[in-house]
Structures are given as structure tokens and as C-alpha cells.
Amino acid sequence: MTIRLFKPCVGSEELEAVRGVFERSWLGLGERVEQFENAWCEHLGCSKSVAVNSATAALHLSLSLFRFPVGKKVLVPSMTFAASANAALYNRLEPLFIDSDDHTLGLDLEDLDRKYTKDCVAVIPVHYAGHPVQMNELVSWARHRNLKIIEDCAHTSGSTYLDVPLGRWGDLGCFSFEEKKIMTTGDGGMISGDDEDLMAPLKAKRWVGIDKDNWKRAAEYTEKNADARHWYYEINLLGYKYNMNDLAACIGLCQLQKLSFFFESRRSLIKRYLQNLGHSDRFKPLVPYEPDSYNYQMFGLRCDRRDELMIFLKNSGIATGCHYTPLHMQPLYKVYTGYCPFIEREQARCITLPLYPDLEIQEVDYICDRIHDFYK
């Protein structure tokens, strides 16, 4: 038996959608992107969404909108992917790393308060593995200090916390549709929010600073209106090549329709893991999973002899991973403030196990049996 760690769940619907894009012969930034943005707004209940080619781009552009002075600090969890901290560096700001809560592995709000200084301008909470940060407490704390909140929702889609969708708590919400995520466009991301004035520059910023979508100009090439001036555009700001394309967007439209199915599949699989693994003094769940409430991207454990277990499972045909090596321990970021003693110790106990909608219940049983065999 060979079991992958992550696997996108795509089928005939996505294939037909891609075929339609091929038949239109418009593969780049086009109408499908706008349709996906509108569908995402309806799904999230927000006023505006802008699709980009990654969550990394989403975080970068979101932070850029505030035009913070060079050298100011952004509060970022250490236990996250590099994109959360790189967004600060791209904007000539400094990441300030925050330790993890020992229960949820999300931001430790006490460490956040300890490390805050008046040089801090924003905070990027990450819903680690899909388990929500205590956003009600974080928002109250951040607003009192006039900090902007960019919600990193790379590990979640379709979850609510205290009846508010994750991604709607902060000034902006950033989502990932990379192939390992809950829903995918291959690669892709989304920026969502309600402040349309704040978000107004985003479409130019994602398209090399050009103020008019290329596909809209192309539609005017042969218009009979002699005054169309279809060739005219302006560049008023520094932009990036961060746009989503119609191929990705048409997949996203299909995936969005399947989101409730993905939620139910992941819920069943996580419940099976928890049922099979039970209680042990050798391991425990990575986060306090509540599969009836939240849509999780990752399932994992905190365990003794982690590295040996990973090799054992590998030799049993089971892929595993480590998410993540804390950023404050990485060479690139060691010059920045943020000693995080809890997660520095705990990260060596964290293992990510296979989770995706196509995973079979009997495969979960096999994984759990092999874990029990290892500890016997």
C-alpha cells in the first residue's frame, strides 16, 4: 500500500470546465477570473475579492495597501509557512515572531502582548491546520493598539468562528488554493474584504500596474465605436505579475461547488483517526480537532520519537510531513526578533499524516494500525 500525504480532489467537472476555456481560446486573465471572484464574495459574504496566483501574492499585496513606513514590525507566528513572514520583507518591514499557543499551535496571545512594541503596525494570524485563532480576543487586542489585521486563511476554507466566516474577522482575508489545500486551482490565492476603497488598487497591483484588464481591452479591438480607444492604458503604480488566469479560475469555480463535500469527507476521516488513535501517553492530536465545526487542511500528531515514526511509516508506504520548522529557527530570519521557546521544543514532536477527500477509511485504519505497531 502506498498512501500520499496530500492529494487534490479533481474530476470530470474540472476537466469539462478546462475544455471550455480551451474552446474559447482565452487561457489568461479573463472572464472566468471575474466570475470566480464574484462567486467567492457570495460564498464568504464579503464586498470584494481579488484573485491572484498564490496566497503568497495575496499576503504581499494586502500588506502593501497600508503603505507602512519602512522598518516597522509585523507580528507573525513562527509556526507557519515562509509566505507569512516574507510578506513583511517584501514590503521592507520586519517580521516579529510570536510563539505558539500550547493547545492550538496558533498565535500565543500572551506572547503577542509581551512582544508588542509601538513599532508594530500589523498582525498576521494564521489558522494553523485549519483550527481558528481566538479571533474575538485578537481583534479586540489589535484594535486597541491600532494594528491592522491580515488574516492568513491558507489552511482553511468554509469555516466560521463564533458565527463569523474565517477571513472576515480582519481588515483583509487571504486564502490559498495551492494543490494541497482544502480546495485548489492548482496554484492560486484570493484577497477578500469589505473596504472597497482600500482594495481599489489591487487589480492594478496584481497586473503589473495596468489599470484596465487585458481581456476587457481585447473585447474592444473590433468594436464599431470609433472612440473606444481600446489600445489606451495607464500605469500609475508599481505592480506585479500576480494575476490568476482563466484556467485556474474555472477549476476554482468547480471546486467551490464541492466545498461542502470536501468538508464532510475531511470530517469523516478526522473522526476515524481520532477514534482509532484513542488516548495515549505517547502521542496526541496536533491541534484540538473539532471536525463538526471546522474544515481542517491537515491532520497530525504530537508524538514521542517523531523522526523514527516517520521513517517507520515511510517504510510502510505511508507519506508524512512536518509543518513546519519554526521560522525563527531558519537562517534567513535569525536576524529578526522573536525567540519562541515553546514551539522550538514542540516542533520536533509534530508529524503531519495523510488527509484528503479521496483517502479511504481503510487507509486511515492502516495508518493508525501501523502507528500502534510502532509504539508497541
Image: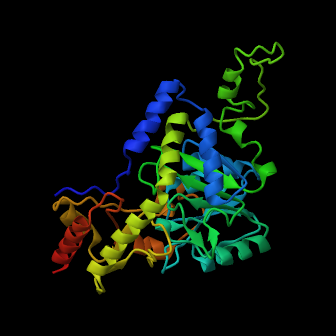
In the image, residue 175 above or below residue 275: above
Indicate left or right for 292 with 318 as reference: right
Front residue of 193 and 58:
193
Indicate left or right for 128 with 170 as reference: left
- Residue at 61% in and 52% down: 40
In the image, residue 190 above or below residue 144: above
- Residue at 78% in and 50% down: 196
- Residue at 48% in and 80% down: 103
Q: Quadrant of the N terminus?
A: bottom left
Indicate left or right for 361 with 12 as reference: left
Camera sees residue 67: no
Front residue of 326 and 259:
259
The image quadrant that residue 347 belongs to is bottom left
Report x, y in % for residue 221.
70, 16
Name the image colouring.
Answer: rainbow
Report x, y in % for residue 171.
72, 60
Indicate left or right for 334 with 303 as reference: right
- Residue at 35% in and 73% down: 301
Front residue of 201 and 333:
201
